[in-house]
């Protein structure tokens, strides 16, 4: 199988990633569309080319691909514990020379430990992470946002609200595919709980009405 072809669409490259692992995150049928949509939402909500952006759970770089292209050299940082999905994305999506030019940096721990980057960020992004993470992990990400950002930083993240028969998640483990699990699934967190968790840390939070990715809503958090 060829690793990379510059004449293939991102959709086709994404389908190659899926032939290695299905735990990719973006969804095979909308791989290209979902990745583009992440960058579009980031730009609509203030991302600048010169910003330093942390992509939490960057997976196979479905969205990261676009962010790396958009941001200046040294602007993109990703954290992803599933190295199989990550390496498949690097092999099949990334044009030769792109990493050398843009110098993205990555960590592969699953503790939301950002200290290894030795950096303060202007933007956090988490697509399809809060739809799998327990509340304690979300609190960890919010603590990281408080500790590792510059003044005026933003955090764009997607989530799903509880519904009848699909309650607010009270568990304390990841739900869905990851480096540790093959079982699909999602979890939901109420906006009320998210707002309280943000306010407890002195963070502003806004539900972005009308902004959606698949069936996930977006929220914007500011420090
Ligand atoms: C649904 S996928 C989304 C991937 C990517 N954001 C995208 O849009 O394609 C969720 C990702 O979170 C990763 N993940 C699981 N546990 C994590 C942790 N503790 N820290 C960071 N990422 C984690 C999974 O391995 C997976 O790649």
Image (spheres, rainbow, N blue to C red):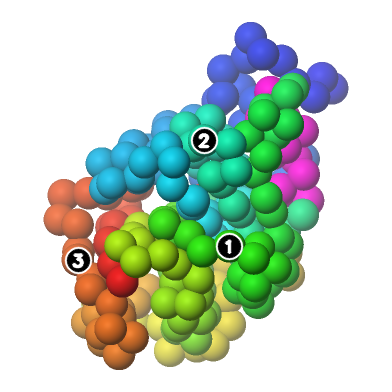
Q: Quadrant of ligand 1?
A: bottom right
Q: Is mark 1 within 8 Å of ligand 1?
A: no
What span is colored magenta in the figure?
84-95
Q: Which residue is mark 2?
A: 72
Say which element carries label 3. strand
Residue lying at 35% horizontally and 62% vertically, measured from the top left: 153
The residue closer to the viewer here, 198 or 89, is: 198
Q: Earlier in the sequence, mark 2 or mark 3?
A: 2
Within-10-Å neighbours for mark 2: few <14, some 14–19, many 20+? some
User: Compared to 191, does 79 lie above or below?
Assistant: above
Residue 116 x, y percent position in the rendering: 70, 68
Residue 206 - label: 3
Which image quadrant is residue 135 in?
bottom left
Q: Measuring from the top left, give residue 211's x and y in whole percent.
A: 22, 49
**Location of the N terminus (image quadrant):** top right
Res. 119 mark? 1
Q: Nearer the viewer, residue 46 or 186?
A: 46
Residue 86 colored magenta? yes
How far is mark 2 from mark 1, CA to CA?
15 Å
Disc nearer the start of the sequence (2/1) = 2
Q: Residue at x 53, y 30 (%)?
A: 69
């Amino acid at each position: 199988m060829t690793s990379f072809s510059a004449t293939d669409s991102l959709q086709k490259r994404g389908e190659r990633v899926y032939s290695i692992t299905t735990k990719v995150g973006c969804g095979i049928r909308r791989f290209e569309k979902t990745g583009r949509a992440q960058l579009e939402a980031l730009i609509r909500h203030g991302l600048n080319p010169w910003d330093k952006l942390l992509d939490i759970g960057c997976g196979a770089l479905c969205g990261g691909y676009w962010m790396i292209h958009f941001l200046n050299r040294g602007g993109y940082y990703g954290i992803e514990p599933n190295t199989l999905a990550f390496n498949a994305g690097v092999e099949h999506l990334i044009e030769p020379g792109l990493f050398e030019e843009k110098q993205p940096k990555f960590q592969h721990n699953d503790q939301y430990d950002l200290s290894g980057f030795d950096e303060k960020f202007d933007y956090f992004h988490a697509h399809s992470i809060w739809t799998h993470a327990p509340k304690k992990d979300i609190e960890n990400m919010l603590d990281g946002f408080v500790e590792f950002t510059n003044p005026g930083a933003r955090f764009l993240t997607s989530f799903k609200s509880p519904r009848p028969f699909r309650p607010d998640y009270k568990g304390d483990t990841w739900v869905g595919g990851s480096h540790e699990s093959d079982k699909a699934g999602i979890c939901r967190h109420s906006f009320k709980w998210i707002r309280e968790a943000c306010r407890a840390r002195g963070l502003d939070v806004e539900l972005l009405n009308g902004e959606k990715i698949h069936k996930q809503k977006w929220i914007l958090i500011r420090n």
